[in-house]
Image: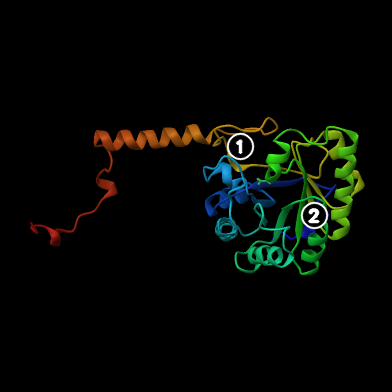
Amino acid sequence: MTTVRDLQAMAGEEPITMLTAYDAVMAGIAESAGIDVLLVGDSMGNAVLGHDDTLPVTVDETASHVGAVARGTDEALVVADMPFLSFGADEGQSVENCGRMLKEEGANAVKLESGPHTVELTEKLAHLGIPVMAHLGLTPQSVNQTGYTQQAGDREEAEEILELATAHEEAGAFALVLEHVPANLAAQVTDAIDIPTIGIGAGGECDGQVLVFTDVVGLAESSPPFAKQFGDAREEMRDAIGEYVEAVESGSFPGEEHASTNEELDDLY
Ligand code: KIV
């Protein structure tokens, strides 16, 4: 099993690969392809649950999907992405929600969309044995404040991200996701801190990369500009299902090899 220490040892030595997964099938496929970290992202909201954004995702939904991913993997580190308002308002509730992902569902760590309000919580969770992956830059749970545009548009915002990165490292975060920020900022953050940075839309100088499963395999109907589609699973799945429909409609499926008969059951009617 991959541990947070293993990931930290990889930083600067070999690129860390992280991909979202939302169920056991996705987890098994991603793990067999060599992914190091499976993030049960709240991107499940728009990627597979049919919502327009991540905000409606609940703690119960997250728990259910984390459990499925954890059951579908042996080696990868499983990170539970804590949904909107499940952390940060009340410390006790935050600890309970995060702890549930490890205690009941088999996650190895949690990810928090981070800001000044998560520094103390990160410290608390780390002390309790709940490894925390921080997340700065574009944090989609703040879509109503920031939209989905690239963050750190000026020096002040970039300095704030650098400061928050250091603050979360000092608080005990084991890794940091940097989303949709200029590549030169991500490179400087990566230099400034010792914990691994994992970029998405943040250039090639981070210690690792993360993308959303449905974007990578070509299942998403639309993807952000910084994502890359590496396959066309939607097309392949549609073709397979189309062939099945045609086979049923034409009577060529099921064939004799897909059924069996029991003579004792003849003449019932
Ligand atoms: O929810 C998610 O998938 C994420 C990644 C894009 C980092 O937070």
Can you say whether 107 is above or below 147 in the image? below
Say what secondary structure mark 2 lies in: helix
Q: Which residue is mark 1?
A: 215
Farthest top residue in view: 225
Inspect the image, locate mark 2, and give the three-letter code of the amino acid beneath it.
His
Task: Look at 70% across and 32% down and name the residue there.
Answer: 226
Label 2 packing within 10 angstroms: few (<14), some (14-19), many (20+): few
Can you say whether 182 is above or below 189 in the image? above
User: Closest to the observer: 115 or 169?
Assistant: 115
Residue 215 placed where, x, y %? 61, 37
242 to the left or right of 30: left
Task: Look at 72% across and 40% down and name the residue there.
Answer: 145
Task: Look at 56% across and 36% down and name the residue there.
Answer: 220
230 to the left or right of 239: right
Residue 105 placed where, x, y %? 60, 64
Visual colour scheme: rainbow
Q: Is mark 1 within 8 Å of ligand 1?
A: no
Residue 182 placed where, x, y %? 82, 33
Label 1 packing within 10 angstroms: few (<14), some (14-19), many (20+): many
Image quadrant containing the C terminus: bottom left
Q: Which residue is mark 2?
A: 117
Q: CA distance from mark 2 to mark 1?
A: 30 Å
Inspect the image, locate mark 1, and give the three-letter code of the amino acid beneath it.
Asp
Can you say whether 219 is above or below 175 in the image? above
